[in-house]
Image (cartoon, grey):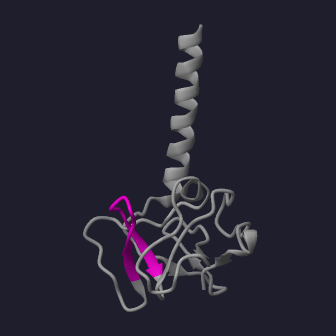
């Protein structure tokens, strides 16, 4: 019984992490601008910036639980920066898109394109424009 519960808990955790990871997965495309000027990821989901990330520092300050709640917009292999879209290297070696020097993130509580539930959260998160 204990083994079954442990296995069930492990499967639930893996499912949750996979779901969170899906938000941060890039299809290889750079972010794009929606009609209202908001930046969106390849899936059309709203992107955010984190005030604690220093502009143009080339790094993210959002790891561990933060990155579960705010999955980074990752860069597909072989993609290259452009004029306003640059790439930052995360502590784990993965690459993340940045806009005008600010790393870009999704918000785990946004469930469909157009959601902007993360705007203003904790006074540190803003919709990327």
| Image quarter (top left, top right, bottom left or bottom right) of the C terminus | bottom right
Q: Is 88 part of what is drawn in magenta?
A: yes
Give the image location of residue 67, x and y in percent.
54, 58
**Residue 68 in the image: above or below residue 16:** below
Pick the residue in front: 120 or 42.
Answer: 120
Give the image location of residue 55, x and y in percent.
51, 86
- Residue at 74% x, 75% y: name it: 123
Give the image location of residue 119, x and y in percent.
72, 73
Q: Is 3 part of what is drawn in magenta?
A: no
Pick the residue in front: 90 or 107.
Answer: 90
Residue found farthest to the top:
1
In the figure, residue 28 lies in which quadrant? bottom left
**Residue 18 in the image: above or below residue 103:** above
- Residue at 50% x, 64% y: name it: 72
Pick the residue in front: 73 or 65.
Answer: 65
- Residue at 29% x, 73% y: name it: 79
Q: Horizontal placement of 84 versus 129: left or right?
A: left
Pick the residue in front: 56 or 114.
Answer: 56
| Image quarter (top left, top right, bottom left or bottom right) of the N terminus | top right
In the figure, residue 83 lies in which quadrant? bottom left
Give the image location of residue 93, x and y in percent.
32, 62
In the figure, residue 56 lies in which quadrant? bottom left
Residue found farthest to the left:
78
User: What count of labels does the image hold?
Assistant: 0
Which stretch appears magenta? 86-98
* Magenta-colored segment: predominant secondary structure: strand
């Amino acid at each position: 019984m204990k083994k079954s519960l442990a296995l069930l808990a492990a499967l639930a955790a893996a499912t949750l992490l996979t779901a969170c990871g899906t938000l941060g997965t890039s299809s290889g495309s750079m972010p794009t601008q929606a009609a209202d000027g908001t930046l969106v990821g390849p899936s059309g989901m709203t992107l955010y910036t984190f005030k604690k990330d220093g502009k143009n520092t080339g790094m993210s300050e959002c790891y561990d639980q933060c990155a579960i709640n705010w999955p980074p917009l990752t860069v597909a292999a072989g993609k290259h920066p452009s004029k306003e879209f640059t790439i930052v290297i995360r502590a784990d070696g993965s690459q993340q898109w940045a806009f005008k020097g600010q790393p870009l993130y999704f918000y785990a509580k946004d469930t469909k394109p157009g959601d902007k539930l993360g705007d203003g959260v904790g006074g540190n998160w803003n919709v990327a424009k």
